[in-house]
Amino acid sequence: MNLDDLAELAQGYRDEEAACTHELRVCMAASCQSSGAMPVFEALTAAANGAPAAGCKVKGVGCMGLCSAGPLVAVARPGDDLAASVLYRDVQVDDAAAIVAGADGAPVERLRCRTDQPFFARQQRIVLENSGVIDPDSLRGYVAAGGYAALVRALSEMRPAEVVQELVASGLRGRGGGGYPTGLKWSTVAKMPDAQKYVICNADEGDPGAFMDRAVLESDPHRVLEGMAIAAYAVGANKGYVYVRAEYPLAVERLTGAIRQATRAGFLGARVAETQFAFEVEIRLGAGAFVCGEETALMASIEGLRGQPRPRPPYPAEHGLWGHPTLINNVETFANVPPIITRGGRWFASIGTEKSKGTKVFALAGTIANTGLIEVPMGTTLRDIIEVIGGGVPGGKAVKAVQTGGPSGGCVPAEHLDNPVDYDSLKSLGTIMGSGGMIVMDETSDMVDVARYFMEFCMSESCGKCVPCRAGTAQMHGLLDRIARGHGTRADLALLENLCEVVQATSLCGLGQTAPTPVLSTLRYFRHEYERKLAEPSFAPGRGAGAA
Amino acid sequence: MPLQPDRPALPSDDKRWKLVNSTMRRHGYAGHALIETLHSVQGAFGYLDEPSLRFVAASLDVPLSKVYGVATFYHLFMLKPKGRHACVVCTGTACYIKGASGLIEAVQRRLGVSPSQTTADNRLSMLTARCVGACGLAPAVVLDGNMLGKQAPQDLLARIEELP
């Protein structure tokens, strides 16, 4: 198969879609489903079938981003993106008839959610370009939207080294949080002489407060598979695994379907796109262990062992799954690959900041008006994300801090909101990019309690292999608990700071090394709250007299 | 050519064992299929008991100690049966900030069960999850597999009362 064949196929699918005049796109991602998207989908289907003017097609699509306003329904012409559609929010079953009737004429104003508001207008969607537009269960929909063109292009027109070169030129960095240059990782694996190599997609999104990977897998699973196949071709692997959390049943279901469809259509399997290249993908389910997001623990888990990390080096690129060179990237990283191959590494490198290229998907949650999923160019300021796109804190309260990076990250206080978001500037603020969860806290949040919450998380998720992490997190949690309950002493605080340093410096893997970060960051910006707890045991910010 | 080791007989003629067996067969009875197999046992029976751990160990030719190690390492595997209904309260950061602990306390006060406990009449187990990825709908609860978003304690207790 060459690009012309694929283009012809895609055109055929587009013509089929164009048979209807309007699409009623119902968000069927997990979040909207739990707000009742399924009954809405059925009601719309019934209403569209009964409508006199035919030409409305009801289609289940992936995440449109504004989860707090779900269930969301978009009315659009086939092929239009989210911005060009009429979007309805908080749709109920009873609204179905009005929406179908309004598809051709005047939109239903009372349900309208404007797509020119900053939440939508300020985003730049690359990873999420198909999300909320195509049907995630349909390979045809993905191909019609230009899917698998990057894979066919790579296979028919590029040598593996050229694919790696394109990734290097793009400046893409790992989206799982570490920020390691993807092109460099690929070229290390590509250089290994072994005949057997593996590609692993890390979809063990364990950070509480992060749901980007879940949305990508639920909304556009073929994009991730295409990215993996391109990676496998570039590094010379023939077998891939997607390690996905068992807590995401819908993502697992869609991914399973996508693998089956892609294999049947010849985009995966023994002869990918009728070439000599073979690539097979298998899903492996996690079983609820946060530490398995760490790459060596993840590989142990795929091998059927307890998910305990091992020292690095050797890195997985040299000695990975069953001892073979292994490329591990995160879901969002793979999702960035197809557009880089189609549009070129230089195009990608033109977006973002000097050292952080492209866009980043963030999950906005906490006390913020617009909770949901957004994608913005690297270098957007936190203030823009929180106050403009996110709509600020509801009820006129002030932002106190923004937590990024989950249990490995820290809190950025309100006075630093004008900092641009990229790997390096977040690091200088004492936190990390992480996988992209952003939790907004208002003035009532108790920062000592937040630190205790994350330490409790790290303590129970510590795998127990190395002493600093196993014992250190328990000790730090005990100290934080004493301080938070007003029984702490100055000596406790000093010991806590001391332990932070030790655990950070001596733990085996990322979990332990970063476990003290939430404590260090809250101590850096909100030390007065710790001090106050020592002096006044009943102090709680935002409550009672202590609020002043 | 290595001899095919003898596979143990199915622990009972319960049809669900065939599901478990087919998972192992699909992976060629390889030791690395252990976690997949345990998932399938738990999917079929709801939890992992000692006979099932012994059966899996013998079938995959993996030491029982290793099977037990894996089963206890991962939070998702349960070694005790769950109640008829499962109420999973998400304790992710967003849910925590928006009052997940209030939900847990409310259930605790009404039904007298702490997280990972089951009521005496075996009607409901309360569990907690690290993050179910529904942060936009915090605080979230998964009641018998159905996601419930933006829960207040009264809402949740009412939903639990309605359960058969």
Image (cartoon, coloured by chain):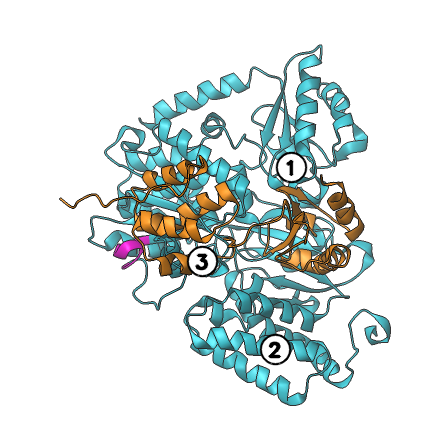
Question: What quarter of the picture does the N terminus of chain A occupy?
Answer: top left
Residue A33 is marked as 1
User: B48 or A381, which is in the foreground?
Assistant: B48
Q: Is residue A411 magenta?
A: no
Label 3 resides on the chain identified as A
Quadrant where the C terminus of chain A sits is: bottom right
Which mark sits nearer the N-terminus, 1 or 3? 1
Magenta-tinted stretch: A318-326
Q: Is residue A417 left or right of residue A458?
A: right
Identify by letter the chain in cyan: A
Looking at the rendered structure, the kind of residue marked 1 is: Gln
Of B105 and A536, nearer the camera is B105
At mark 2, the secondary structure is helix
Quarter assignment of residue A102:
top right
| Image coordinates for residue A427, horizontal then vertical, percent | 53, 68
Q: Which residue is mark 2?
A: A478
A5 lies above or below A217: above
- Cα separation, mark 2 vs mark 1, equals 40 Å
Q: Residue furthest left?
A: B1
Single out the mark in the foreground, 3 or 2: 2
Query: Mark 2 belongs to which amino acid?
Result: Gly
Residue sitting farthest toward the top: A52
Q: Would you name the residue on which mark 3 appears?
A: A292
Question: Pointers 3 and 2 in contact (CB under 8 A)?
Answer: no
Q: Earlier in the sequence, mark 3 or mark 2?
A: 3
Residue nearest the observer in this picture, A341 or A323: A323
The lab-note entry on whether marks 2 and 1 share a chain reads: yes
Chain containing the residue with disc 2:
A
Give the left or right position of residue A224, taking residue A485 as reference.
left
Q: Residue at x 36, y 66 (%)?
A: A310
Q: Residue at x 61, y 47 (%)?
A: A374
Check the rendered structure and report the hue given to chain B: orange
